[in-house]
Image (cartoon, coloured by chain):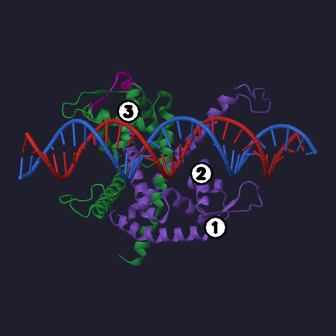
Chain colours: A purple, B green, C red, D blue
Amino acid sequence: MTKADGASAELAITQLILAVFKLNGRLVAAGDRLVGTLGLTSARWQVLGALVLQDGKATASDAARVMGLTRQSVQRLATAMIGEGLIEPTANPRHVRAPLLKLSSKGKAAYAAAARRQSPWARTLAEGVPIGQLASTEALILTLASCLEEQAAADRAQRQRGRALTPTGTRRAKKARA
Amino acid sequence: MTKADGASAELAITQLILAVFKLNGRLVAAGDRLVGTLGLTSARWQVLGALVLQDGKATASDAARVMGLTRQSVQRLATAMIGEGLIEPTANPRHVRAPLLKLSSKGKAAYAAAARRQSPWARTLAEGVPIGQLASTEALILTLASCLEEQAAADRAQRQRGRALTPTGTRRAKKARA
DNA sequence: AGCAGTTTGACAGTACACTGTCACTAACGA
DNA sequence: TCGTTAGTGACAGTGTACTGTCAAACTGCT
């Protein structure tokens, strides 16, 4: 590991990051165009997908974990989608206030329609790139994502320690933040 | 190209897309943590970077083109950053209402500080991945982004045609949308 | 010069995602 | 059993990005 290696890695990763930002924006826009006339957006479509994968056995928080978003973000989407009749809350024997979320018939229809549109779109998009690289690219991206996830968790723990300063066992500060 | 190829490409690209969404969220969050105490955010930091690259010869719209965002988004950031004293508008001989944007001394200091923090952070992040793949991954991502860009441009043109129906030469509808 | 078309800044409205907080529920250990 | 800890929904506030729209400024063509 020479100095040059570190510097070139730094440059390469910075450019990769900017590329990810750019692609993300385009993907969201493309998704919105693809399913917009179905009463969906990229984000809501993703929520439906997560719920389908969990087969009706997921709460909003569960879906958030699968999607890698905060539970608040997914809650907001889920509440809106319940209001629109895309999702139906079902009694959860394990938690009174955290209903299991299932697709309504309307939600299933919308998701199926979205899948029908996405299929040819995805194939067209894949034509533009060397197919063999798709999987390795995904792997690299997920590796970076989990590195950042660890980092974020470490930072959170750091801030926690800074705030509490006592392991909550002998906490004497409970309202000292006011 | 067999059927199986198309289907596997479809699956691979779908998973890649979800991975990009995930990484994007983590990157934005990491960037915010990295430069938050400098009075910056990921987005504002990027604007400063774009302006540095253009060396003070860019308007907000120019920066937007470089960054791959809409000009409205960048305008909003630029206006806010002018208010915060990070950026200074300068007379533009080529356009009265479109000032050239330059970093103020405060903006330069913030950008330099951000760069100092980013450097070790980027190297650490790069350690977790095979360095040789960074560049090829970036290339693939940019390829996808430009495919989507073309698609978006085509869709816009489509909608334009649908709305106008006359090549603006004999337009008779100018207020017919009300 | 005059007019059509384009570019630009500004404003409005919508949608997402994050942090921070609070109250309530569930699970676990003393 | 009781109290601590973790999980969950809901609400508030902030920041970002998109589309749509308008008026002013610029460009090019006639």
Whether B68 is drawn above or below A101: the answer is above
Residue B131 part of the magenta segment: no
Give the total of numbered labels: 3
Badge 2 is on which residue? Answer: A76
Look at label 2 and name its amino acid.
Answer: Arg
Q: Secondary structure at mark 1?
A: loop
- Horizontal relation, residue A59 to residue A43: left or right: right
Report crowding for label 1: few under 14, some 14 to 19, many 20 or more residues within 10 A (C-alpha).
Answer: few
| Res. A55 mark | 1
Q: Residue at x 66, y 34 (%)?
A: A160
Q: Residue at x 50, y 63 (%)?
A: A39
Position of residue B41 measured from the top left corner of the image (x, y, whole percent): 46, 35
The range drawn in magenta is: B99-110
Look at label 1 and name its amino acid.
Answer: Asp
Do tags 1 and 2 sit on the same chain?
yes
Position of residue B156 measured from the top left corner of the image (x, y, whole percent): 31, 58
* Quadrant of the rendered image containing residue B174: bottom left
Q: Nearer the viewer, residue A158 or B58?
A: B58
Q: Residue at x 45, y 58 (%)?
A: B17
Q: Chain of mark 2?
A: A
Do tags 2 and 3 sit on the same chain?
no
| Res. A93 mark | none
Q: Nearer the viewer, residue B148 or B12?
A: B148
Look at label 3 and name its amino acid.
Answer: Thr
Position of residue D8 measured from the top left corner of the image (x, y, whole percent): 69, 51
Q: CA distance from mark 1 to mark 3?
A: 47 Å
Badge 3 is on which residue? Answer: B79
Report crowding for label 3: few under 14, some 14 to 19, many 20 or more residues within 10 A (C-alpha).
Answer: some
